[in-house]
Image (spheres, grey):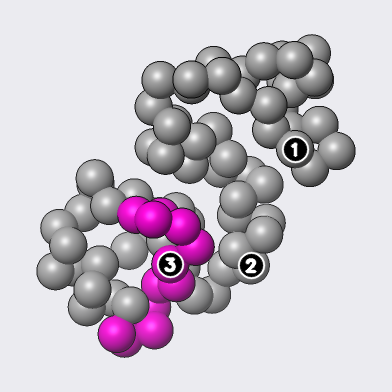
Amino acid sequence: MSEVILLATDHPRSTLSRLVKQDSIVKIARGVYVRSTVDPEKAVARYWRDIVGYLVPQAVITDRSARTGGPANGVLYLAS
């Protein structure tokens, strides 16, 4: 397993369940997991685009986030 972020759509549910039980991955949101050896906050900061694309697939980045190209002061402004 080389991915830092694992999404439920990319892996069988049985695989994710087994990895959680083995403490290999940690659930950070519905259908979003990170390897247990990775700091979840750093992983989210790096892969936020993948996570948002999974959780809110039709969203558009708006307002301050559009101007800064990402989260502004820890907040991501979206419209869906």
Mark 2 packing: few (<14 Cα in 10 Å), some, or many (20+)?
few
Residues 72 and 37: in front is 72
Q: Position of residue 31 (x, y in %)?
A: 34, 54
Q: At 49% across and 62% down in the image, what residue appears?
A: 28
Give the CA distance from mark 1 to mark 3.
Answer: 21 Å
Q: Where is residue 13 in the image (x, y as percent from the top left)?
A: 17, 62
Mark 1 packing: few (<14 Cα in 10 Å), some, or many (20+)?
few
Look at the picture and state if 26 lies above or below 78: below
Figure label count: 3
Q: At 43% across and 32% down in the image, what residue appears?
A: 56
Do the numbered discs 1 and 2 sit on residues whose CB atoms are within 8 Å?
A: no
Q: Which tag, 2 or 3, sits closer to the chain's start?
A: 3
Residue named by callout 3: 27
Q: Callout 1, which amino acid?
A: Val
For marks 2 and 3, give the one nearer the viewer: 3
Q: Which tag, 1 or 3, sits closer to the chain's start?
A: 3
Q: Callout 2, which amino acid?
A: Asp
Q: Which residue is at the far bottom?
A: 22
Residue named by callout 2: 39
Q: Give the range drawn in magenta.
A: 21-32
Q: Is mark 2 on a helix, strand or loop?
A: loop
Residue named by callout 1: 75
Is 46 magenta? The answer is no
Q: Callout 3, which amino acid?
A: Lys
Q: Is mark 3 on a helix, strand or loop?
A: strand
Do the numbered discs 2 and 3 sit on residues whose CB atoms are within 8 Å?
A: no
Mark 3 packing: few (<14 Cα in 10 Å), some, or many (20+)?
some
Q: Can residue 36 be seen in this view?
A: yes
Q: At 39% across and 84% down in the image, what residue appears?
A: 23
Dividing the picture into quadrants, the one containing residue 42 is bottom right
Residues 34 and 55: in front is 55
Q: Which residue is at the far front?
A: 80
